[in-house]
Image: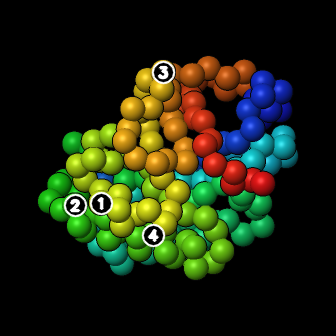
Amino acid sequence: DWTKVAADGVEFAFIRVGLRGYGTEGKLVEDEYFEQNVKGALQAGIKVGVYFYSQAITTAEAREEAQFVLNHLGGYEITYPVIFDWEQSSEAERTASLDNTALTDCAIAFCDTIEALGYRAGCYFNQYFGYDRFDLRRLDDYCLWLAEYNSYPSFLYNVQLWQYSQSGHVPGIDTAVDLNLCLADFAG
């Protein structure tokens, strides 16, 4: 119930557009609640950003994912960034051998494709991915969104979004939700 979410003081939300499957074929799948959630949030006056759960292993796949996202954004007022969310999964054998350079190349390919159409793009990561997997020096031109579940971020790099909890409760949402702080002015 996005009206209740807005009444609780939530100013922005990131809505998942879709994901790339873990299987060897890496099928692109739209989130079944994307349209309902993006419409509901916008109608309630909540600013919206979106993300795609990537399992890209090549820059061609990352660009394909970005185009998939862009194809779903038409007509919606997206004021927060479009985020590349690549996470390692034990189920994702297809990504097991992806090296750090290739991963960063995928993030750049996704972000460049998104920004070519005028949206702000960015990359989501936790401390491990921020320090050990991504080359953040190469991602400095994009929005950086850190997941670190503490009372304050200890990450030694400039980020624009901070996900500080994965177990928040917000009226209007029946399950636990991620809670974030915005450290930049995207909607200004």
Taking depth in this image into account, of 85 and 23 the one nearest to the observer is 85
Q: In which quarter of the image is the C terminus?
A: bottom right
Q: Residue 178 appears in which quarter of the rendering?
A: top right
Residue type at the position of mark 3: Ser
CB contact under 8 Å: marks 2 and 1: yes
Alpha-carbon span between mark 2 and mark 1: 7 Å
Residue 114: x and y in percent read: 55, 71
Q: Which mark is residue 100?
A: 2
Sequence-wise, the earlier of marks 4 and 1 is 4
Q: Left or right: where does residue 99 sit relative to residue 13?
A: left
SS of the residue under disc 4? helix
Residue 120: x and y in percent read: 61, 64
SS of the residue under disc 1? loop
Residue 177: x and y in percent read: 56, 28
Q: Which mark is residue 135?
A: 1
Colour scheme of the picture: rainbow
Alpha-carbon span between mark 4 and mark 3: 31 Å
Q: Which residue lies under the disc numbered 3?
A: 151
Q: Residue at x 60, y 70 (%)?
A: 70
Q: Residue at x 32, y 71 (%)?
A: 105
